[in-house]
Protein backbone atom coordinates (compact mmCIF):
# COMPACT_ATOMS: atom_id res chain seq x y z
CA UNK A 1 0.00 0.00 0.00
CA UNK A 2 1.19 3.51 -0.76
CA UNK A 3 1.36 6.41 1.68
CA UNK A 4 -1.27 7.86 -0.64
CA UNK A 5 -4.56 6.13 -0.02
CA UNK A 6 -8.17 6.92 -0.58
CA UNK A 7 -10.23 7.32 2.55
CA UNK A 8 -13.95 8.00 2.76
CA UNK A 9 -14.79 11.54 1.60
CA UNK A 10 -11.33 12.10 0.12
CA UNK A 11 -10.38 12.65 -3.49
CA UNK A 12 -9.57 9.80 -5.85
CA UNK A 13 -6.05 8.40 -5.69
CA UNK A 14 -5.16 9.74 -9.15
CA UNK A 15 -6.27 13.20 -7.99
CA UNK A 16 -3.91 12.92 -5.01
CA UNK A 17 -1.10 11.96 -7.39
CA UNK A 18 -2.09 14.91 -9.61
CA UNK A 19 -1.94 17.29 -6.61
CA UNK A 20 1.44 15.95 -5.55
CA UNK A 21 2.86 16.39 -9.06
CA UNK A 22 1.48 19.93 -9.37
CA UNK A 23 3.00 20.74 -5.99
CA UNK A 24 6.37 19.42 -7.13
CA UNK A 25 6.20 21.34 -10.42
CA UNK A 26 5.35 24.53 -8.54
CA UNK A 27 8.34 23.94 -6.31
CA UNK A 28 10.51 23.63 -9.43
CA UNK A 29 11.46 20.01 -8.93
CA UNK A 30 11.08 20.00 -12.71
CA UNK A 31 11.42 23.27 -14.58
CA UNK A 32 9.73 24.42 -17.83
CA UNK A 33 10.38 22.01 -20.74
CA UNK A 34 11.98 19.49 -18.39
CA UNK A 35 10.91 15.87 -18.68
CA UNK A 36 8.89 14.28 -15.88
CA UNK A 37 9.89 10.82 -14.61
CA UNK A 38 8.23 7.98 -16.48
CA UNK A 39 4.86 6.56 -15.42
CA UNK A 40 6.65 3.40 -14.35
CA UNK A 41 9.16 5.26 -12.17
CA UNK A 42 6.48 7.35 -10.47
CA UNK A 43 4.23 4.35 -9.89
CA UNK A 44 7.14 2.60 -8.19
CA UNK A 45 8.06 5.62 -6.10
CA UNK A 46 4.53 6.44 -4.96
CA UNK A 47 3.59 2.76 -4.79
CA UNK A 48 0.42 3.15 -6.78
CA UNK A 49 -0.75 1.44 -9.95
CA UNK A 50 0.65 2.72 -13.27
CA UNK A 51 -2.90 3.46 -14.47
CA UNK A 52 -3.32 5.83 -11.51
CA UNK A 53 -0.24 7.77 -12.58
CA UNK A 54 -1.41 7.67 -16.19
CA UNK A 55 -4.75 9.23 -15.17
CA UNK A 56 -2.92 11.91 -13.17
CA UNK A 57 -0.77 12.68 -16.25
CA UNK A 58 -3.90 12.94 -18.41
CA UNK A 59 -5.31 15.48 -16.00
CA UNK A 60 -2.01 17.42 -15.98
CA UNK A 61 -2.25 17.51 -19.78
CA UNK A 62 -5.87 18.68 -19.73
CA UNK A 63 -4.97 21.42 -17.26
CA UNK A 64 -2.13 22.51 -19.54
CA UNK A 65 0.53 21.82 -16.95
CA UNK A 66 2.43 19.36 -19.15
CA UNK A 67 2.68 18.57 -22.84
CA UNK A 68 3.52 15.32 -24.59
CA UNK A 69 6.35 14.71 -27.01
CA UNK A 70 5.70 11.71 -29.20
CA UNK A 71 7.18 8.57 -27.63
CA UNK A 72 9.47 10.73 -25.48
CA UNK A 73 7.24 11.36 -22.47
CA UNK A 74 5.66 14.25 -20.59
CA UNK A 75 7.28 17.70 -20.31
CA UNK A 76 6.51 20.66 -18.05
CA UNK A 77 4.68 23.52 -19.81
CA UNK A 78 6.28 26.95 -19.86
CA UNK A 79 4.49 29.74 -18.00
CA UNK A 80 3.42 27.83 -14.86
CA UNK A 81 3.87 29.91 -11.71
CA UNK A 82 6.84 28.31 -10.00
CA UNK A 83 8.42 29.29 -6.72
CA UNK A 84 11.41 31.61 -6.95
CA UNK A 85 13.73 29.80 -4.57
CA UNK A 86 14.38 26.93 -6.93
CA UNK A 87 17.19 25.28 -5.01
CA UNK A 88 15.32 24.88 -1.76
CA UNK A 89 15.02 21.24 -0.71
CA UNK A 90 11.83 19.71 -1.98
CA UNK A 91 11.08 17.60 1.02
CA UNK A 92 8.02 19.54 2.11
CA UNK A 93 6.05 17.78 -0.58
CA UNK A 94 6.62 14.50 1.30
CA UNK A 95 4.46 13.15 4.11
CA UNK A 96 5.21 14.22 7.67
CA UNK A 97 3.93 11.99 10.40
CA UNK A 98 5.04 10.17 13.52
CA UNK A 99 2.51 7.40 13.80
CA UNK A 100 3.90 5.83 16.95
CA UNK A 101 4.11 9.01 18.93
CA UNK A 102 0.44 9.77 18.21
CA UNK A 103 -0.56 6.36 19.61
CA UNK A 104 1.74 6.68 22.61
CA UNK A 105 0.02 9.87 23.66
CA UNK A 106 -3.37 8.10 23.94
CA UNK A 107 -4.77 8.67 27.45
CA UNK A 108 -4.86 5.10 28.81
CA UNK A 109 -3.89 3.50 32.13
CA UNK A 110 -2.04 0.49 30.71
CA UNK A 111 0.49 1.59 28.10
CA UNK A 112 1.88 -1.48 26.37
CA UNK A 113 2.99 0.86 23.59
CA UNK A 114 5.89 2.41 25.48
CA UNK A 115 9.25 0.81 24.61
CA UNK A 116 10.58 2.79 27.55
CA UNK A 117 11.92 1.66 30.85
CA UNK A 118 9.76 2.22 33.91
CA UNK A 119 11.23 5.40 35.48
CA UNK A 120 11.28 3.70 38.88
CA UNK A 121 13.89 1.24 37.52
CA UNK A 122 16.27 4.09 36.66
CA UNK A 123 18.83 5.55 39.08
CA UNK A 124 16.95 8.75 39.95
CA UNK A 125 18.52 9.25 43.38
CA UNK A 126 22.04 8.95 41.99
CA UNK A 127 21.28 11.38 39.24
CA UNK A 128 20.44 14.10 41.70
CA UNK A 129 23.83 13.44 43.42
CA UNK A 130 25.62 13.62 40.08
CA UNK A 131 23.91 16.86 39.13
CA UNK A 132 25.29 18.44 42.31
CA UNK A 133 28.73 16.96 41.65
CA UNK A 134 28.76 18.28 38.08
CA UNK A 135 27.92 21.81 39.21
CA UNK A 136 30.77 21.63 41.73
CA UNK A 137 33.21 20.40 39.09
CA UNK A 138 32.10 22.76 36.32
CA UNK A 139 30.61 25.87 37.93
CA UNK A 140 30.21 27.53 34.49
CA UNK A 141 28.58 24.54 32.83
CA UNK A 142 25.36 26.42 32.13
CA UNK A 143 27.13 29.52 30.90
CA UNK A 144 28.64 28.07 27.76
CA UNK A 145 27.95 25.99 24.66
CA UNK A 146 29.33 22.50 24.14
CA UNK A 147 31.33 21.96 20.94
CA UNK A 148 29.04 20.93 18.07
CA UNK A 149 30.67 17.47 17.89
CA UNK A 150 30.07 16.97 21.60
CA UNK A 151 31.94 17.58 24.85
CA UNK A 152 35.59 16.61 24.38
CA UNK A 153 35.84 14.83 27.74
CA UNK A 154 32.80 12.74 26.88
CA UNK A 155 34.10 11.94 23.38
CA UNK A 156 37.46 10.87 24.86
CA UNK A 157 35.71 8.64 27.34
CA UNK A 158 33.40 7.09 24.72
CA UNK A 159 36.31 6.60 22.30
CA UNK A 160 38.11 4.56 25.00
CA UNK A 161 34.89 2.64 25.71
CA UNK A 162 34.23 1.81 22.03
CA UNK A 163 37.88 0.89 21.44
CA UNK A 164 37.57 -1.59 24.31
CA UNK A 165 34.17 -3.01 23.36
CA UNK A 166 34.23 -2.84 19.56
CA UNK A 167 37.57 -4.65 19.00
CA UNK A 168 38.78 -1.74 16.89
CA UNK A 169 40.44 1.62 17.54
CA UNK A 170 37.92 4.45 17.68
CA UNK A 171 39.27 7.99 17.94
CA UNK A 172 37.37 10.89 19.53
CA UNK A 173 37.36 12.60 16.08
CA UNK A 174 35.18 9.80 14.75
CA UNK A 175 32.48 10.54 17.32
CA UNK A 176 29.52 12.87 17.22
CA UNK A 177 27.24 13.26 20.24
CA UNK A 178 23.59 13.65 19.30
CA UNK A 179 20.38 14.32 21.15
CA UNK A 180 19.26 10.70 21.17
CA UNK A 181 19.44 8.14 18.37
CA UNK A 182 16.35 9.71 16.84
CA UNK A 183 18.28 12.89 16.09
CA UNK A 184 21.12 10.83 14.64
CA UNK A 185 18.72 9.08 12.24
CA UNK A 186 17.22 12.42 11.27
CA UNK A 187 20.61 14.08 10.66
CA UNK A 188 21.76 11.12 8.60
CA UNK A 189 18.61 11.24 6.46
CA UNK A 190 19.06 15.00 5.99
CA UNK A 191 22.76 14.73 5.17
CA UNK A 192 23.06 11.69 2.97
CA UNK A 193 19.78 11.55 1.05
CA UNK A 194 18.04 13.49 -1.61
CA UNK A 195 14.40 12.94 -2.56
CA UNK A 196 13.77 9.63 -4.37
CA UNK A 197 17.03 8.06 -3.23
CA UNK A 198 16.47 4.40 -2.44
CA UNK A 199 16.66 3.45 1.24
CA UNK A 200 16.56 -0.15 2.36
CA UNK A 201 14.81 -0.95 5.63
CA UNK A 202 14.11 -4.12 7.50
CA UNK A 203 10.54 -5.32 7.39
CA UNK A 204 9.31 -4.72 10.05
CA UNK A 205 11.31 -1.68 11.08
CA UNK A 206 11.44 0.95 13.83
CA UNK A 207 8.41 3.11 13.08
CA UNK A 208 9.98 6.55 13.62
CA UNK A 209 12.85 5.65 11.28
CA UNK A 210 10.33 4.78 8.55
CA UNK A 211 8.61 8.13 9.12
CA UNK A 212 11.94 9.98 9.04
CA UNK A 213 13.10 8.45 5.75
CA UNK A 214 9.66 8.96 4.22
CA UNK A 215 9.62 12.61 5.26
CA UNK A 216 12.92 12.96 3.41
CA UNK A 217 11.26 11.72 0.22
CA UNK A 218 13.16 8.41 0.16
CA UNK A 219 11.97 5.55 -1.96
CA UNK A 220 11.82 2.68 0.50
CA UNK A 221 12.57 -0.96 -0.29
CA UNK A 222 12.57 -3.69 2.33
CA UNK A 223 14.23 -6.90 3.37
CA UNK A 224 12.54 -9.24 5.85
CA UNK A 225 13.93 -9.80 9.34
CA UNK A 226 12.93 -12.86 11.38
CA UNK A 227 14.31 -14.64 14.43
CA UNK A 228 17.02 -16.12 12.21
CA UNK A 229 18.02 -12.74 10.81
CA UNK A 230 17.90 -11.90 7.10
CA UNK A 231 17.44 -14.05 4.03
CA UNK A 232 20.88 -13.10 2.67
CA UNK A 233 20.13 -14.20 -0.92
CA UNK A 234 16.97 -12.10 -1.05
CA UNK A 235 18.80 -9.20 0.58
CA UNK A 236 21.56 -9.34 -2.01
CA UNK A 237 19.04 -9.47 -4.85
CA UNK A 238 17.33 -6.34 -3.52
CA UNK A 239 20.67 -4.56 -3.14
CA UNK A 240 21.66 -5.52 -6.64
CA UNK A 241 18.36 -4.54 -8.24
CA UNK A 242 17.57 -1.37 -6.27
CA UNK A 243 21.06 -0.06 -5.40
CA UNK A 244 20.02 1.51 -2.09
CA UNK A 245 21.99 4.52 -0.95
CA UNK A 246 21.50 3.48 2.68
CA UNK A 247 20.48 0.38 4.58
CA UNK A 248 19.09 1.40 7.97
CA UNK A 249 19.12 -1.59 10.33
CA UNK A 250 18.62 -2.39 13.98
CA UNK A 251 20.24 -5.83 14.14
CA UNK A 252 20.55 -6.33 17.91
CA UNK A 253 17.33 -6.94 19.86
CA UNK A 254 15.57 -5.47 16.92
CA UNK A 255 12.59 -3.24 17.54
CA UNK A 256 9.91 -4.62 17.23
CA UNK A 257 10.81 -8.33 16.73
CA UNK A 258 13.63 -8.74 19.30
CA UNK A 259 15.68 -10.58 16.63
CA UNK A 260 19.48 -10.65 16.71
CA UNK A 261 21.18 -10.95 13.32
CA UNK A 262 23.84 -13.71 13.55
CA UNK A 263 27.55 -12.97 13.23
CA UNK A 264 28.05 -14.70 9.85
CA UNK A 265 25.32 -12.52 8.33
CA UNK A 266 26.88 -9.38 9.84
CA UNK A 267 30.17 -10.26 8.22
CA UNK A 268 28.55 -10.89 4.83
CA UNK A 269 26.52 -7.67 5.09
CA UNK A 270 29.56 -5.44 5.23
CA UNK A 271 30.98 -7.25 2.20
CA UNK A 272 27.75 -6.63 0.30
CA UNK A 273 27.62 -3.01 1.43
CA UNK A 274 31.11 -2.49 0.06
CA UNK A 275 30.34 -4.32 -3.18
CA UNK A 276 27.11 -2.38 -3.86
CA UNK A 277 28.36 0.92 -2.39
CA UNK A 278 25.55 1.04 0.14
CA UNK A 279 26.07 2.82 3.44
CA UNK A 280 24.94 0.75 6.42
CA UNK A 281 23.31 2.72 9.22
CA UNK A 282 23.46 0.48 12.26
CA UNK A 283 21.12 1.59 15.03
CA UNK A 284 22.29 -0.05 18.27
CA UNK A 285 19.85 1.03 20.93
CA UNK A 286 19.47 -2.09 23.09
CA UNK A 287 22.79 -4.03 23.20
CA UNK A 288 23.11 -3.92 26.99
CA UNK A 289 19.58 -5.11 27.65
CA UNK A 290 20.22 -8.84 27.33
CA UNK A 291 18.92 -11.53 29.67
CA UNK A 292 21.16 -14.62 29.52
CA UNK A 293 23.77 -14.08 26.84
CA UNK A 294 25.58 -11.02 25.62
CA UNK A 295 24.69 -10.41 21.95
CA UNK A 296 27.20 -10.78 19.10
CA UNK A 297 29.40 -7.72 18.35
CA UNK A 298 27.92 -4.89 16.26
CA UNK A 299 27.99 -4.99 12.45
CA UNK A 300 30.32 -1.99 12.76
CA UNK A 301 33.04 -4.22 14.20
CA UNK A 302 33.10 -6.33 11.01
CA UNK A 303 33.54 -3.30 8.76
CA UNK A 304 36.90 -2.78 7.08
CA UNK A 305 35.85 -0.41 4.28
CA UNK A 306 34.14 2.45 6.15
CA UNK A 307 30.75 1.23 5.01
CA UNK A 308 29.04 1.54 8.40
CA UNK A 309 27.75 4.50 10.37
CA UNK A 310 27.15 3.26 13.91
CA UNK A 311 24.53 4.87 16.17
CA UNK A 312 24.62 3.99 19.84
CA UNK A 313 21.88 5.32 22.07
CA UNK A 314 22.30 5.54 25.83
CA UNK A 315 18.80 6.90 26.18
CA UNK A 316 16.75 3.94 27.11
CA UNK A 317 18.55 2.40 30.01
CA UNK A 318 20.81 5.11 31.32
CA UNK A 319 18.60 8.17 31.14
CA UNK A 320 15.93 8.98 28.55
CA UNK A 321 15.81 12.51 29.97
CA UNK A 322 19.45 13.27 29.13
CA UNK A 323 18.94 12.23 25.47
CA UNK A 324 22.53 11.12 24.84
CA UNK A 325 23.59 9.06 21.82
CA UNK A 326 26.89 8.74 19.98
CA UNK A 327 27.50 8.26 16.27
CA UNK A 328 30.70 6.68 14.96
CA UNK A 329 31.08 7.97 11.45
CA UNK A 330 33.73 7.41 8.74
CA UNK A 331 35.94 10.55 8.52
CA UNK A 332 34.87 11.37 4.93
CA UNK A 333 31.26 11.76 6.02
CA UNK A 334 31.81 13.38 9.38
CA UNK A 335 32.00 17.00 8.16
CA UNK A 336 28.59 16.81 6.53
CA UNK A 337 27.05 15.30 9.63
CA UNK A 338 28.63 17.86 11.95
CA UNK A 339 27.34 20.67 9.73
CA UNK A 340 23.84 19.21 9.88
CA UNK A 341 24.13 18.97 13.66
CA UNK A 342 25.28 22.59 13.92
CA UNK A 343 22.34 23.71 11.80
CA UNK A 344 19.95 21.64 13.91
CA UNK A 345 20.94 22.82 17.39
CA UNK A 346 24.61 23.90 17.55
CA UNK A 347 25.45 20.95 19.83
CA UNK A 348 23.66 18.96 22.52
CA UNK A 349 23.36 20.60 25.95
CA UNK A 350 26.66 20.55 27.87
CA UNK A 351 25.07 19.92 31.25
CA UNK A 352 23.43 16.72 30.00
CA UNK A 353 26.70 15.49 28.54
CA UNK A 354 28.64 16.14 31.75
CA UNK A 355 26.05 14.43 33.96
CA UNK A 356 26.03 11.48 31.61
CA UNK A 357 29.84 11.33 31.53
CA UNK A 358 30.19 11.09 35.28
CA UNK A 359 27.51 8.50 35.59
CA UNK A 360 28.85 6.52 32.62
CA UNK A 361 32.31 6.30 34.18
CA UNK A 362 31.05 5.29 37.62
CA UNK A 363 30.78 1.77 39.07
CA UNK A 364 27.11 2.52 39.66
CA UNK A 365 26.38 1.99 36.00
CA UNK A 366 27.43 -1.65 36.00
CA UNK A 367 25.43 -2.30 39.17
CA UNK A 368 22.44 -0.57 37.60
CA UNK A 369 22.70 -2.77 34.47
CA UNK A 370 22.84 -5.96 36.51
CA UNK A 371 19.67 -5.04 38.42
CA UNK A 372 17.89 -3.72 35.36
CA UNK A 373 18.46 -6.91 33.36
CA UNK A 374 16.92 -9.02 36.12
CA UNK A 375 13.96 -6.66 36.57
CA UNK A 376 13.22 -6.61 32.84
CA UNK A 377 13.56 -10.36 32.49
CA UNK A 378 11.02 -10.83 35.28
CA UNK A 379 8.61 -8.46 33.56
CA UNK A 380 9.04 -10.27 30.27
CA UNK A 381 8.26 -13.57 32.00
CA UNK A 382 5.17 -12.10 33.67
CA UNK A 383 3.90 -10.97 30.29
CA UNK A 384 4.61 -14.37 28.75
CA UNK A 385 2.88 -16.16 31.62
CA UNK A 386 -0.28 -14.08 31.16
CA UNK A 387 -0.21 -14.59 27.41
CA UNK A 388 0.29 -18.35 27.74
CA UNK A 389 -3.48 -18.62 28.37
CA UNK A 390 -4.12 -17.57 24.76
CA UNK A 391 -3.33 -19.14 21.41
CA UNK A 392 -1.19 -16.11 20.49
CA UNK A 393 2.35 -16.86 19.39
CA UNK A 394 5.74 -15.22 19.85
CA UNK A 395 9.44 -16.01 19.92
CA UNK A 396 10.78 -15.27 23.38
CA UNK A 397 13.43 -12.54 22.92
CA UNK A 398 16.89 -12.76 24.51
CA UNK A 399 16.84 -9.03 25.28
CA UNK A 400 15.23 -5.70 24.42
CA UNK A 401 11.94 -4.30 25.63
CA UNK A 402 9.26 -5.90 23.47
CA UNK A 403 7.32 -9.03 22.59
CA UNK A 404 6.37 -9.34 18.95
CA UNK A 405 3.16 -11.32 19.14
CA UNK A 406 1.36 -13.05 16.30
CA UNK A 407 -2.41 -13.17 16.66
CA UNK A 408 -4.57 -15.86 15.05
CA UNK A 409 -5.45 -14.99 11.44
CA UNK A 410 -9.11 -14.30 12.32
CA UNK A 411 -8.25 -11.49 14.77
CA UNK A 412 -8.66 -8.05 13.28
CA UNK A 413 -5.86 -5.97 14.83
CA UNK A 414 -7.61 -2.63 14.38
CA UNK A 415 -10.78 -3.87 16.06
CA UNK A 416 -8.68 -5.35 18.84
CA UNK A 417 -6.98 -1.97 19.32
CA UNK A 418 -10.32 -0.14 19.49
CA UNK A 419 -11.62 -2.67 21.99
CA UNK A 420 -8.39 -2.51 24.06
CA UNK A 421 -8.45 1.28 24.14
CA UNK A 422 -11.99 1.10 25.54
CA UNK A 423 -10.45 -0.95 28.37
CA UNK A 424 -7.72 1.64 28.83
CA UNK A 425 -4.98 -0.52 27.27
CA UNK A 426 -2.83 0.43 24.29
CA UNK A 427 -0.48 -1.61 22.12
CA UNK A 428 1.13 -1.03 18.74
CA UNK A 429 -0.36 -2.74 15.65
CA UNK A 430 2.24 -4.48 13.51
CA UNK A 431 1.34 -2.36 10.47
CA UNK A 432 3.00 0.63 12.17
CA UNK A 433 6.34 -1.08 11.62
CA UNK A 434 5.70 -1.82 7.97
CA UNK A 435 6.88 0.86 5.55
CA UNK A 436 3.93 0.04 3.34
CA UNK A 437 1.41 -0.08 6.21
CA UNK A 438 0.32 -3.55 5.09
CA UNK A 439 -2.18 -5.21 7.38
CA UNK A 440 -0.44 -7.51 9.81
CA UNK A 441 -1.53 -10.05 12.38
CA UNK A 442 1.36 -9.01 14.63
CA UNK A 443 1.25 -6.60 17.53
CA UNK A 444 4.06 -5.17 19.65
CA UNK A 445 3.71 -5.36 23.42
CA UNK A 446 6.32 -3.60 25.58
CA UNK A 447 6.99 -5.17 28.95
CA UNK A 448 9.41 -2.55 30.22
CA UNK A 449 7.17 0.30 31.25
CA UNK A 450 4.60 -1.14 33.68
CA UNK A 451 5.39 -2.87 36.96
CA UNK A 452 4.47 -6.54 37.33
CA UNK A 453 1.04 -5.97 38.86
CA UNK A 454 0.00 -3.44 36.26
CA UNK A 455 1.49 -5.53 33.49
CA UNK A 456 -0.64 -8.52 34.54
CA UNK A 457 -3.76 -6.37 34.66
CA UNK A 458 -2.96 -4.75 31.29
CA UNK A 459 -2.50 -8.11 29.59
CA UNK A 460 -5.65 -9.54 31.20
CA UNK A 461 -7.65 -6.62 29.84
CA UNK A 462 -6.07 -7.03 26.42
CA UNK A 463 -6.82 -10.75 26.30
CA UNK A 464 -10.39 -10.03 27.39
CA UNK A 465 -10.70 -7.38 24.65
CA UNK A 466 -9.64 -10.04 22.15
CA UNK A 467 -12.23 -12.52 23.42
CA UNK A 468 -15.15 -10.16 23.62
CA UNK A 469 -15.19 -8.82 20.13
CA UNK A 470 -14.39 -12.21 18.57
C1 LIG B 1 15.44 1.13 17.26
C2 LIG B 1 15.35 2.46 17.91
N1 LIG B 1 16.14 3.46 17.48
C3 LIG B 1 16.10 4.68 18.05
C4 LIG B 1 15.23 4.97 19.07
C5 LIG B 1 15.23 6.35 19.66
O1 LIG B 1 16.16 6.40 20.65
P1 LIG B 1 16.54 7.74 21.43
O2 LIG B 1 15.68 7.79 22.64
O3 LIG B 1 17.99 7.59 21.73
O4 LIG B 1 16.27 8.88 20.49
C6 LIG B 1 14.38 3.97 19.55
C7 LIG B 1 13.41 4.25 20.59
O5 LIG B 1 12.42 3.57 20.77
C8 LIG B 1 14.44 2.69 18.96
O6 LIG B 1 13.67 1.69 19.37
Image (spheres, rainbow, N blue to C red):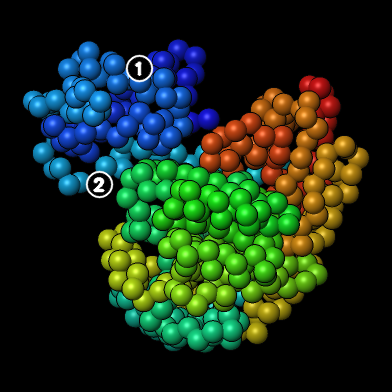
**Residue 419 occupies quadrant:** top right
Decide: is 324 above or below 156. above
**Residue 396 seen in this snapshot:** yes
| Residue ID at (45%, 12%) | 9
Percent position of residue 401, x then y: 69, 56
Q: Secondary structure at mark 1?
A: helix
Q: Which residue is mark 2?
A: 89
416 and 146: which is toward the camera: 416
| Residue ID at (35%, 58%) | 192
Percent position of residue 424, x then y: 70, 34
Q: Earlier in the sequence, mark 2 or mark 1?
A: 1
Q: Which residue is mark 1?
A: 55
**418 with respect to 329 (left or right):** right
389 and 129: which is toward the camera: 389
Percent position of residue 176, x then y: 40, 72
Q: Residues within 10 Å of mark 2 (few under 14, many from 20)?
A: few
Amino acid sequence: MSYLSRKKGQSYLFEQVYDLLVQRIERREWKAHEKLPSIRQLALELQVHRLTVFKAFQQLKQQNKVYVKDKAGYYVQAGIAQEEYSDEPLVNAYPKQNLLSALQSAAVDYHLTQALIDPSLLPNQYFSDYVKKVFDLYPKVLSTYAPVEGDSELRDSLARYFTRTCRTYVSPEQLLITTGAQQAIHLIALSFLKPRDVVMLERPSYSAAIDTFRAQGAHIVTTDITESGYDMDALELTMKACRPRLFYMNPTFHNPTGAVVPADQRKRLVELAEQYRCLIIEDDTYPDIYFENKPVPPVYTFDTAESVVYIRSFSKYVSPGLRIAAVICPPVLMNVLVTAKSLADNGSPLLNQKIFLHYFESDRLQQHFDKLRIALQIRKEVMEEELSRTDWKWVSPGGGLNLWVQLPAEQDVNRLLASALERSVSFVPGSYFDSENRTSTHIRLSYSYLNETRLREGIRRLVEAGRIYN
